[in-house]
Image (cartoon, helix red, strand yellow):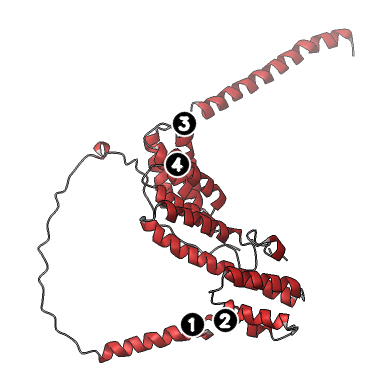
Amino acid sequence: MSPNASSSSSPKRFLLILLMASTVALCGCSMFNKIGFGEEEESPKSQPPEVLIVQGMDAYNTGSYNDAIKNFKVILDEHPFSAQAMLAELKSADAHYYNRQYAEAKVLYKAFEEHHPTNEAIPYVLFQIGMCDYSRSDRIDRDASGPRDAIKSFTRLINAHPQSPYAKEAKTKIKDAQEFLINHEYMVAVFYVRAARYDEAKHRLKYMLTRYPDSNLAPKAQELLDSLEAGNKPAWGMNRYLPEFMTQAPADRQETKDAKKAAIQAGEAAKNTPAVDKPATEAPPAVAKPVVDKPVADRPVIDTPAVDAPTTEPPPAVDMPAADPDMPATERP
């Protein structure tokens, strides 16, 4: 190529590069305007806390817990001193709990307790802390740390607020957690027997009888322990040492049969009871309550944490249990 041809093509090449650069720049500006300044829906971060709390509660009440958590988080991050912050803090913990994120929920409940120690919702918060532990209960042949922590958490609630309506429910949950631990200890002992690890089985049975002497499984545990100490190692026929719930279907268990029998007897007794005519009592006249019509904008914002009745879900399934930390060192397998 001649020098003249090369020199004549250089301006054309330069103009082509300049034209391409201008096109890219214009496209970039157009895209930037569309993304940054277009008429799009406001992001949660650009909305006031009054709007965010409504959106969060709507999502929470419809079971959209992830969306609820996002709205509550924006309130706590950007409006921590707003009137809606305390409700967002509590409901964020609730949303995590009902989303089965028990570890995260427990952290948030404990943070609420620390930030608002005298709030009227504290008994509920303490109960929910226990429920986070209780909900971690796995199958009886696996980890048992959840029920142990639940007993401690519920006991703290009962000691701090004995008159709270949640204290009664906490006592019931403690009994359920203890029943779980009893079955867990016995199941582990049975596992050791089946694995021919008789010394570990005897240690576990002795610990169980010492810790839970009045449990329903205590007689079977004592029978199995006596058999092992007498040298009668059961190589087969272990079903005689197992509770009914481990070996029989629900319809075949004695407790189910007893419940059906009691229901039949109650029905027959009701049929044989003579009817008693009671004097008719007129219902008191209904008192009409005044209806206060206020514009939605004039209604006060409720910033007191609402207490939802706790629900108990069947625990999801996690391997073979670790030794009980409360067991004396000399009696651990």
The residue that mark 2 highlights is 244
Q: Is residue 49 above or below residue 202?
A: above
Classify mark 4: helix, strand or loop: helix
Q: Residue furthest bottom?
A: 272
Identify whether 324 is placed above or below 215. above
Q: Amino acid at mark 3?
A: Glu
Front one among 312 and 5: 312
Q: Which mark is residue 36?
A: none
Q: Quadrant of the N terminus?
A: top right
Q: Nearer the N terminus, badge 2 or badge 3?
A: 3
Q: CA distance from mark 2 to mark 1?
A: 9 Å
Mark toward the viewer: 3 or 4: 4
**How many angstroms separate mark 3 from mark 4 (CA)?**
13 Å
Residue to which mark 3 is pinned: 78
> CB of mark 3 within 8 Å of CB of mark 4?
no
N-terminal of the pair, mark 3 or mark 4, is 3
Among the two numbered marks 2 and 1 on one chain, the one whose residue lies closer to the N terminus: 2
Secondary element at tag 1: helix
Q: Residues within 10 Å of mark 3 (few under 14, many from 20)?
A: some
Q: Earlier in the sequence, mark 1 or mark 4?
A: 4
Residue 229 or residue 58, whichever sits in front:
229
Closer to us: 98 or 218: 218
Q: Percent position (x, y) of residue 303? A: 34, 40
Looking at the rendering, in which quadrant would you find the C terminus?
Answer: bottom right
Q: Mark 2–mark 1 contact, CB under 8 Å?
A: yes
Question: Mark 1 — residue?
Answer: 255
What residue sits right under mark 4 in the picture? 89
Which of the two discs, 4 and 2, sits closer to the camera?
A: 2
Give the amino acid type for the residue marked by disc 4 in the picture: Glu
